[in-house]
């Protein structure tokens, strides 16, 4: 997995996704049509979008760091961002998120640099 910090709040995630992880998802039936020798293979995946820190959460809920996906590619094929939501089994392209500790006040993505501001 690789992370590229583009700048202006944009990051790009790249990596290889094993084909077997799609089994049972919306493309599971398509995988059964592929030659068996392809089963252990993997696809290159590229996700690009704005990194957003949730501004507020309900009391007791953890804040989340979101990647608003604007570009999505499988292999060499660029696909609409909404397709990622379908593959991941979620509604909408805003599908990738991570919990953030309460002490994180802000995040800034610049070209090649991620700045995290912590509350004292």
Image (spheres, rainbow, N blue to C red):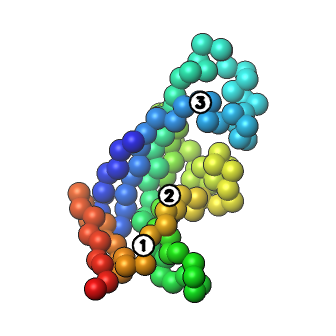
- Residue 9, position as x, y percentages in the image: 35, 67
Q: Is residue 55 above or below residue 80?
A: below
In the picture, the disc for residue 19 is: 3
Marks 3 and 1, Cα distance to the nearest angstrom?
Answer: 33 Å
Q: Is residue 12 left or right of residue 56?
A: left
- What is the quadrant of the C terminus in the image? bottom left
- What is the quadrant of the N terminus in the image? top left
Q: Is residue 59 left or right of residue 116?
A: right
- Residue 68, position as x, y percentages in the image: 50, 63
Q: Nearer the viewer, residue 70 or 24?
A: 24
Residue at (42% x, 65% y) in the render: 51
The disc, 3 or 2, on the residue closer to the chain's N-terminal end is 3
- Residue 61, position as x, y percentages in the image: 57, 78
Q: Nearer the viewer, mark 3 or mark 2?
A: 3
How many other residues sit within 10 Å of disc 2, few (<14), some (14-19) or many (≥20)? some
Q: Which residue is mark 1?
A: 101
The disc, 3 or 1, on the residue closer to the chain's N-terminal end is 3
Q: Nearer the viewer, residue 105 or 25?
A: 105
The disc, 1 or 2, on the residue closer to the chain's N-terminal end is 2
Let me know if residue 51 appears in the view: yes
Q: Nearer the viewer, mark 3 or mark 1?
A: 1
Q: Which residue is mark 2?
A: 70
């Amino acid at each position: 997995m690789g992370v590229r910090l583009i700048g202006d709040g944009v990051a790009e995630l790249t990596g290889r996704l094993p084909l077997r992880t799609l089994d049972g998802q919306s493309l599971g039936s398509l995988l059964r049509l592929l030659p068996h020798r392809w089963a252990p293979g993997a696809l290159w995946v590229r996700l690009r979008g704005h990194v957003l820190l949730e501004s507020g959460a309900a009391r007791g809920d953890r804040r989340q760091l979101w990647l608003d996906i604007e570009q999505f590619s499988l292999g060499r094929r660029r696909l609409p961002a909404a397709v990622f939501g379908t593959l991941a089994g979620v509604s909408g392209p805003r599908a990738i998120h991570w919990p953030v500790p309460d002490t994180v006040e802000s995040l800034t993505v610049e070209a090649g640099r991620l700045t995290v501001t912590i509350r004292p």
